[in-house]
Amino acid sequence: MTPRTPHVWLCHCLAPDAWCPTTELLHSMEQPGFDWEPILALAHRGLVATSLYPALQRRGLLAAAPTEVVAHLTTLHALNAEHNQLLRRELRAAARLFNQIGVEPLLLKGALALLPDAYPGAESRLMGDLDLLVPADRLADCQQALNAFGYHAAHPETGHAGHHHAPPLFHPEHGCKFELHRAVLGRLLEAVLPTKDIWRDSHRVVLEGAFVRAPSPTHRILHNALHTLLQDHRAESGILELRQLLDLVQLRARDDAGIDWPLVQARFEARGQYAALGAYLRAARDLFGQPLPAGCPPSIAATWLEWKFTFGVRHPAAIRWYHWHTRLKRLPKRLCTPSWYPMKIRALLRGAPL
């Protein structure tokens, strides 16, 4: 079916060719009234604009795009490639420092896109900081190694002592940032994805002479979904992050046979959140054309959340209004809860958003 709306066209363009044929995308581009402005706005808002240029190039659609659009995406692609080259250089240097003190850091989230065996298209992913998991009892040693390399915390450890990661470390010259994790997820989700399990099933990867570790495909999927849906409260707010969903889509496209979907399903069911997982996977199907995984049948309870996800992609202002309206309704009760104040203060000290 030819994609008619900007969000569907964008996601179909970013999806693997087998699910969303190029001919359908080209047919849409040739229709009167096809508008690039909402597509580019959505791509930037969803943090996937850097992935659009290589997708158009791969599909042979650059020639069909307006000159100013191609110029914009070409510049963006070049700047992002330069930034990711810096991140790769700093990651390699940090890994070598850690190796010298007997630590092989385990890469999380965007840092995995810098590995040589990353999924196709990973090199164009937009990245901010580098998330590294290190043994909890060696975190201070790793911090000291980065301190000696020019990295320093923007704010003290206060509020981070019980957090799953230490304060971010910045380099004042080029702005690269590391976030060292003592655990994969916060305390409320530690039982769903134990850090010891991540270490146990990880595998070593050689990064230009340095040794790092990468999670198993199953744990990468679990971390992506748990972090996005529950830790960042996206299932509650209905605000879908296209960059995180695209990560899941691309990882599944490469490693779906190696993912233990019954385990993923069981972990979400144990938290009473299988509907959130179902809605997330259905959003991947509806936006990117990716079939649902075997063994994860859709549930009726996921229908409402899936609709909220897709509605939020099309109408971000409306879904954000709904999110803040819901939070404001709960504010009087929270203001009358004494434990809410120290929790919020600790979150602010960590730099977490309100």
Image (cartoon, rainbow, N blue to C red):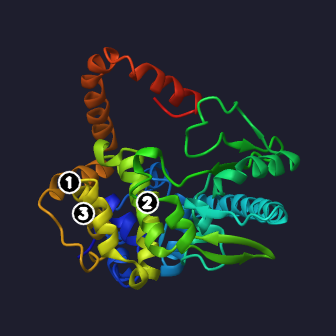
Is 250 on the left-hand or right-hand side of 98? left
- Of pointers 2 and 1, the one earlier in the residue sequence: 2
Depth check: give the residue in front, 250 or 270. 270
Under tag 2, what secondary structure?
loop
The one of 195 and 22 positioned closer to us in this rendering = 195
Q: Which residue is mark 1?
A: 307
Q: Which residue is mark 2?
A: 193
Residue 1 in the figure: left or right of residue 126: left
Q: Which residue occupies 88% across, 47% down?
A: 148
Q: CA distance from mark 2 to mark 3?
A: 18 Å
Residue sitting at 52 percent across and 59 percent down? 195
Q: 38 or 181, which is in the foreground?
A: 181
Q: Position of residue 339 (x, y in %)?
A: 39, 22
Amino acid under disc 3: Gly
The answer for how far apart the CA atoms under marks 2 and 1 are is 27 Å
Closer to the observer: label 2 or label 3?
A: 2
Under circle 3, the secondary element is: helix
Q: Amino acid at mark 2?
A: Leu
* Rendering coords of residue 66 (x, y %): 50, 64
Q: Secondary structure at mark 1?
A: helix
